Image: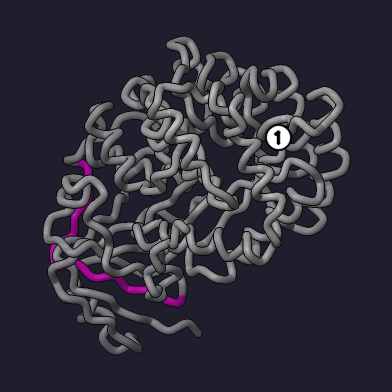
């Protein structure tokens, strides 16, 4: 039998229950329980409510108490559905060149870009790469992110893509955060591959992905659809074939040029990520589908480009998730809460829409229906902020961090700050 534990009281308990998965939301729909408590059985939420009511109702069954100073706000743990935190090397030189006015493409031509990270990552032993990944995961955990999607994609050959996914698996053992690995071997066609993009993708389908499946290294596959990477037609075929192999699928689309979204929707991806240049027509198509729109404000901030049209996506009826895109090149910030807060002020997203985008709607993009809401039967992942009003969390734009983080009902070490050197 799992232990029954009562945690609280909290000044406010924000459940995020009762919302739809698509379309606009309103702040007056937010369920806020004052002087709240949460009853946990093992790694599952048994019940939420007034702390005193739970104490009275379950007094004879409760086996332990975790008393909390009542000046905290409790809410679900954050879910970051798009990161590239498994990498080696630095791209600080890329950023310096960008500050001098160079474009993403020009920087790649000067020896920077994805290929620079690939060369550094290929040289890194699996254990060291796992340590770096765990450090970054703990940084996110320190910011309240309890579930983290992590992509490969800086190996770009059979051995190194396997190494990256094995590193992510090892990293998962060194953090209390839950890591969800995604195979992004179709990031770009590596310059040292002599064949065509079609040849490269065939190699992934016939050699790499079956081995990933056999070793249970990932249940997800991603592809970057862009004229600098893979064309829509070949990407759509690749995604459909990956799906036949038993993988869940997602795609990078419409970051620098429009048109990739149609390939993602034809393949019925779980999510379509980036969307900075998505067209009005594609917004309507995406909103009419079951695919989650994942916007990445960190990439816009890192590259100095416009944000994805989050407000338009919501008005059209899309399901909107917000992710950090933490990577060494285009999105080095790695602060989901700050990025979501900044996106909100520019795209006129309200508190409910922002919180939904980094909790249960984000989990939906990973095909996870067991987290992101504080209610009976959900995973006991939640975070406590040192404030008395939930509105303070976005007001401070990422500078107010949670002081207590629970994962699977257990209080974590809250993560160690990452050493960037």
Most extreme residue toward the top is: 281
Residue of label 1: 186
Question: In the image, 342: left or right of 319?
Answer: left
Q: Answer whether residue 378 is visible to the viewer in this image.
A: no
Would you place residue 329 above or below residue 9 in this image?
above
Name the residue at 70% across, 61% down.
Answer: 125
At x 71%, y 50%, the residue is 122
Instruction: Give the camera-side residue of 313 and 20.
Output: 313
Q: Quadrant of residue 7?
A: bottom left
Write down the region rendered in magenta: 29-42
How many numbered markers are drawn? 1
- Density class for disc 1 (Cα within 10 Å; few <14, some 14-19, many ≥20) is many
Q: As displayed, is residue 16 above or below residue 343?
A: below
**Magenta stretch, main secondary structure class:** strand
Residue 327: image x %, image y %?
51, 43
At 37% from the left and 47% from the top, the residue drawn is: 336
Residue 51 rendering spot, x and y as whole percentages: 19, 73
Q: Is residue 29 left or right of residue 44?
A: left
Q: From where the camera sits, is residue 329 visible?
A: yes
Instruction: Examine the structure image and report whether residue 35 is included in the region drawn in magenta.
Output: yes
- The structure residue drawn at horizontal position 74% and vertical position 48%, both measured from the top left corner, is 161
Across and down, in percent, residue 29 comes to 22, 42
Give the image quarter of residue 387.
Answer: bottom left
Q: Mark 1 falls on what kind of element?
A: strand
């Amino acid at each position: 039998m799992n232990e029954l534990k009562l945690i609280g009281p909290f000044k406010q308990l924000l459940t995020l229950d009762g919302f739809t998965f698509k379309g606009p939301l309103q702040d007056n729909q937010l369920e806020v329980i004052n002087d709240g408590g949460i009853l946990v059985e093992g790694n599952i939420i048994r019940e939420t409510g007034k702390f005193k009511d739970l104490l009275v109702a379950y007094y004879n069954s409760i086996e332990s108490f975790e008393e909390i100073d009542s000046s905290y706000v409790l809410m679900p743990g954050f879910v970051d559905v798009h990161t590239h935190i498994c990498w080696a090397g630095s791209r600080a030189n890329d950023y310096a060149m960008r500050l001098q006015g160079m474009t993403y493409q020009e920087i790649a031509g000067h020896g920077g870009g994805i290929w620079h990270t690939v060369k550094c990552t290929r040289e890194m032993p699996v254990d060291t790469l796992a340590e770096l990944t765990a450090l970054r995961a703990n940084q996110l955990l320190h910011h309240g992110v309890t579930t983290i999607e992590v992509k490969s994609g800086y190996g770009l050959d059979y051995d190194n893509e396997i190494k990256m996914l094995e590193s992510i698996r090892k990293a998962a053992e060194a953090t209390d955060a839950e890591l969800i690995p995604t195979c992004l071997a179709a990031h770009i066609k590596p310059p040292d591959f002599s064949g065509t993009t079609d040849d490269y993708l065939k190699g992934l389908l016939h050699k790499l992905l079956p081995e990933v499946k056999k070793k249970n290294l990932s249940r997800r596959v991603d592809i970057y659809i862009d004229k600098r990477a893979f064309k829509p037609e070949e990407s759509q075929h690749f995604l459909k074939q990956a799906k036949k192999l038993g993988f869940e699928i997602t795609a990078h689309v419409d970051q620098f040029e429009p048109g990739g979204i149609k390939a993602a929707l034809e393949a019925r991806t779980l999510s379509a990520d980036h969307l900075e240049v998505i067209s009005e027509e594609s917004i309507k198509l995406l909103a009419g589908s079951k695919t989650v729109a994942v916007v990445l404000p960190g990439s816009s901030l890192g590259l100095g480009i416009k944000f994805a049209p989050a407000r338009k996506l919501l008005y059209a009826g899309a399901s909107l998730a917000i992710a950090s895109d933490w990577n060494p090149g285009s999105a080095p910030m790695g602060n989901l809460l700050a990025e979501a807060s900044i996106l909100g002020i520019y795209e006129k997203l309200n508190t409910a829409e922002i919180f939904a985008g980094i909790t249960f709607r984000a989990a939906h993009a990973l095909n996870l229906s067991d987290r992101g809401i504080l209610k009976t039967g959900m995973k006991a992942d939640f975070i406590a902020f040192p404030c008395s009003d939930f509105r303070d969390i976005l007001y401070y734009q990422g500078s107010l961090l949670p002081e207590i983080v629970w994962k699977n009902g257990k209080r974590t070490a809250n993560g160690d700050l990452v050493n960037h050197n």
